[in-house]
Image: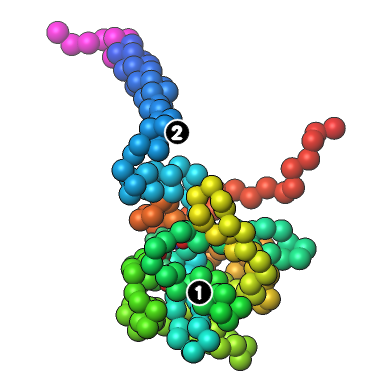
Amino acid sequence: MFSTNLEILQREKQQKSREACSYKKRTMALTRIDRMQLEQMDKIQRLHLVNSCTGFKSANLIGTISNSGQTNVAIFSSVTHLGSDPALIGLVIRPSFQPRNTYQNIKEYGYFTVNHVYKDIIAAAHQSSANYTAEESEFDHTDLEAVYHGGCPVPFVKGSPVKLLCKFVSEYLIHENGCMHIIASIESIFYEESLMDEEKHLCLEKGNVVTIAGLKAYLLPSLLAEFPQAKVPK
Ligand SMILES: Cc1cc2nc3c(=O)[nH]c(=O)nc-3n(C[C@H](O)[C@H](O)[C@H](O)COP(=O)(O)O)c2cc1C
C-alpha cells in the first residue's frame, strides 16, 4: 500500500515533534555536582572540571626575565581586565610546591609581557605549560620565538598580534586556596594596526586570536554580531 500525501505530511509532522521533544528533554537533563562532591573528587579531575565550568578564557603567554637574564614564557588563562583608568590587569598564579618561574621572575624584575595566543602557535603555547626548570627557557625548548620591542629586555612572543608590557603593582594572597592574584599596570600596548576599529576596539578575531576551554582545548572564535551600548528603552 502506498501512503497518501496527507499521511506522509502527518508522519513528517509527528517525527519533527518527536525530535523537538527529545531535544528539549536532552537539554533539560542536567547533571548536578555539589561542593562536597567537588571536595571529594580526584585532584586532577576537579582541576579540569572547575577550570572549564566558568567558561571560555583568554589565552596568553606570559614572557618574563630573571635578574640574571634567564628568559621564560608560559601559558596562562587567568589574565583578566581589572579596570581601564588606570589600566590594570590581574593574573592568578596557582599554588605549587615547585618554584613557579613566572612568579619569581615577575617579583624579581618587576616587568612582564602578555602575548595573545593565535591559531598558528597553539601547540607550542600549550607545550610551554610543561615543568621546565628555571635554567631552561621555553623559548629554547618549544617553537615559540622571543622578540624584543621598544628597547625592553623582557621577551615578547614573535608573531603574537596583541602584546602588552606590564609592570607589577601588587599581589593578594587568596587565603582560601593559596593562589596569588597579581595586579599589574599596562605600560604599553603593541598591536597589529589592522585589528583596530574606528572606536579603538581591538578586533581579536581578525588576528586569529584563540580562546581556551578548561586546560586542554583551544578554540577560534568567530564574530556573531556587534551591538551598540545597551540602553533602557524609553
Ligand atoms: C591552558 C592552560 C592554562 C593555564 N593557566 C594557568 C594560570 O592561569 N595560572 C597558573 O598558575 N598556571 C596556569 N597554567 C599552568 C602553567 O602554564 C604551568 O604551571 C607552567 O609550567 C608555569 O610555568 P613557569 O613555572 O615557567 O611559571 C595553565 C596551563 C594550561 C595548559
Residues 87 and 70: in front is 70
Q: Nearer the viewer, residue 5 or 123?
A: 123
Where residue 4 sits, quadrant-wise, is top left
Judge left or right: residue 40 versus residue 210: left
Image quadrant containing the N terminus:
top left
Sort mark 2 into few (<14), some (14-19) or many (20+) by Cα contacts within 10 Å: few
Residue that badge 2 annotates:
35
Determine if residue 116 is in view. Answer: yes
Residue wearing tag 1: 104
Distance Cα–Cα, label 1 vs label 2: 32 Å
Name the quadrant containing residue 232.
Answer: top right
Mark 1 Cα-neighbour bin, 10 Å: few <14, some 14–19, many ≥20: some
Disc 1 within 8 angstroms of ligand 1 (CB): yes
Residue 2 on the magenta span: yes
Q: Amino acid at mark 2?
A: Arg
Relative to residue 83, is residue 48 drawn left or right?
A: left
CB under 8 Å between callouts 1 and 2?
A: no
Residue type, label 1: Gln
Q: Quadrant of residue 11?
A: top left
Q: Is residue 219 left or right of residue 67?
A: left
Q: Which residues are magenta?
A: 1-9
* Residue 127 in view, yes or no: no
Is residue 208 shown above or below 217?
Answer: below
The residue sitting at 49% across, 89% down in the picture is 68
Name the N-terminal-most of marks 1 and 2.
2
